Image (cartoon, rainbow, N blue to C red):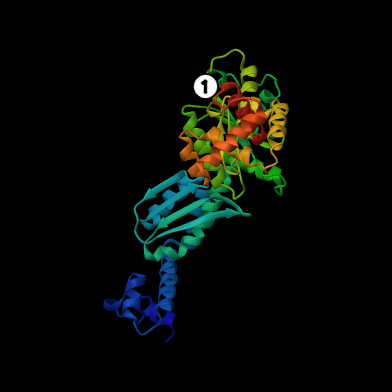
Amino acid sequence: MSTLGEVRLRLGLEADADDGAASTTVDEAVRLLPHLPRSEVEAAAQATLALAALQSIGLPTLLGALRGAAMSPQPERELVELTVNWTGGFAEIRASWGDTVASAGRAAGPTETTRLDHHERHVGTLTVALPAPWQALIPVLAEYALLARLRSAAAGAARRRVGERMLDALLSGQEASGSDRLGQEAFALAVATLPPGTPTQDQALDLLAAVGEGYFSERRLVGHATVRGGQAVWLWTTLDLPREARELHLALTASTALDVRLGVSGRHPGGTRKLLETVQRAFGEARQALAATRQARGHSIFHDLDALHALLSEGRLDTLAAQIGAQLAALNDDGRTADTLRAYLAHRGTLAELALALEIHVNTLRYRLRRAEEVLGGRLSDPALLARLYLAFGAETA
């Protein structure tokens, strides 16, 4: 007899089956058929039990219920609850950035997580822990979970178009209908970019905009998103800006393998009559914070920036940097003295400790600093010279 035939016999699905020997789980089938390959018994038992479960409900009924759940106004929640009601197990759907969208039930089997992807776009995960008879249906449930996530995304996109028009108008300095509520609450603005030359960049930015808006929606925050000038832009009512900035960046980086840099404005109070001016100011702050973000997958908040950042980054100190560079280059020492000065400015201990960190003798350190003073025409104990060096070196890195 074939493996499938023996499994069906042990599962009590054949006419001549011994009711006393019938099993009801995959593990029992394996135990009762030790002479057959375990992998074959597990596969046959799982498929057979799933078929029996399907027959008990009826395939048209099953598919109709799954389709109805996926097409409902809250598809993820309906699908999870339907799965739990059928199987008596556990089901959970999460967004691509990790938020739980819907969850119900208790584990009644091994936990299995399926990544939900659509055209290489990560849209979420399905996690289930089902009784053995239902485990073969996990791929089917995953397909309907993907459909549910895509329907939610489509509904969000439709809502986003309204907010997108409002945000585009505000960023362009125009009055926008629907902005009244925004003006009554504290808000912030964020800007994100992808690496230059990213394939299908507009599509990737549009995806980022949708992910960010989904993040705000899950937290019951009023948020709007748009894409303009090679950047994704968000404006939202903020409650805890540092946490929201951090979690927004995590949500964006979780949704794509691309390097995402994010700049976030400060928190602007609501109730102002000059909403357009405030939005423009927040937009400028977000772009400055983005410019100050050096890490490929990093984020910065405007109010956390070095106060000298704008001065350093806008090219206003190029002349000073060139002067200092030319004076130090006259030493003709391959930049060793300049590097030593940079380390000196960043050091807070003794010269002996600095020399140890640089792996040079302390007398060598003193010689280099003395030579620097000679070509710079001042003493390193003079705060004015130290300030000039700090600004010049800062302008180089900016």
Q: Residue at x 39, y 53 (%)?
A: 84
Q: Is residue 108 visible?
A: yes
Quadrant location of the C terminus in the rendered image: top right
Q: Which of 62 and 2 is in front in this view?
A: 2
Please provide percent x and percent y for residue 34: 34, 82
> In this image, 106 relative to 306: left or right?
left
- Disc 1: which residue: 186
Closer to the camera, 204 or 15?
204
Please report the residue visible at 50 percent of the width from the left and 54 percent of the height from the top. 66
Image x and y of residue 129, in percent: 39, 58
Is 351 positioned to the left or the right of 120 in the image? Answer: left
In front: 346, or 333? Answer: 333
382 left or right of 13 in image: right
Amino acid type, label 1 = Ala
Question: Looking at the figure, which quarter contains the N terminus?
Answer: bottom left
Q: Residue furthest left?
A: 20
Give the percent coordinates (x, y) of residue 364.
Answer: 55, 41
